[in-house]
Image (tube, rainbow, N blue to C red):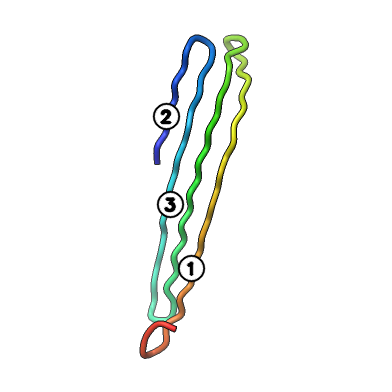
């Protein structure tokens, strides 16, 4: 996980990146889940309490199942 933020006077830009990798296995199945998320944003402080924002987000999730036989992986 990473986050950055840069500002100059009233303008600012930022970026977030996150990776999550999960997995588990039993004698019958092996499961893995990977997720990547990225976000970029830019903004401007209109007033002290109001921001105007624009940005984009990317999300990718991959799941893998492997079933086991008695003699090995199928």
Residue at mark 3: 20
Q: Secondary structure at mark 3?
A: strand
Residue that protrudes farthest toward the left in the picture: 71
Q: Secondary structure at mark 2?
A: strand
Judge left or right: residue 7 versus residue 71: right
Task: Report, in whole angstroms, how far the alpha carbon at label 2 lies from the one at label 1.
Answer: 31 Å
Q: Nearer the viewer, residue 13 or 69?
A: 13
Residue at mark 1: 64
Residue at mark 2: 4
Residue at left offset 44%, top offset 65%: 32
Quadrant (top left/top right/bottom left/bottom right) for the N terminus: top left
Pinpoint residue 25: horizontal percent, then vertical percent. Answer: 39, 72
Task: Report, in whole angstroms, how far the alpha carbon at label 2 lies from the one at label 3.
Answer: 19 Å
Q: Quadrant of residue 2?
A: top left
Pinpoint residue 34: horizontal percent, then vertical percent. Answer: 46, 57
For label 2, the crowd category at 10 Å Cα-Cα, with few meaning under 14, some 14 to 19 and many 20 or more, is few
Counting residues from the start of the chain, the first of labels 2 and 3 encountered is: 2
Give above or below for 33 relative to 53: below
Q: Are marks 3 and 1 in contact (CB under 8 Å)?
A: no
Pinpoint residue 69: horizontal percent, then vertical percent. Answer: 42, 87
Counting residues from the start of the chain, the first of labels 2 and 1 encountered is: 2
Q: Nearer the viewer, mark 2 or mark 3?
A: 2
Judge left or right: residue 54 versus residue 60: right
Q: Secondary structure at mark 1?
A: strand
Task: Report, in whole angstroms, how far the alpha carbon at label 3 lies from the one at label 1.
Answer: 14 Å
Counting residues from the start of the chain, the first of labels 3 and 1 encountered is: 3
Residue that protrudes farthest toward the bottom in the picture: 71
Label tally: 3
């Amino acid at each position: 996980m990473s986050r950055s933020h840069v500002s100059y006077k009233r303008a600012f830009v930022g970026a977030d990146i996150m990776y999550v990798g999960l997995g588990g296995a039993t004698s019958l199945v092996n499961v893995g889940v990977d997720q990547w998320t990225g976000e970029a944003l830019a903004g401007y402080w209109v007033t002290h309490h109001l921001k105007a924002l624009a940005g984009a987000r990317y999300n990718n999730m991959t799941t893998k199942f492997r079933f086991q036989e008695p003699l090995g992986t199928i």
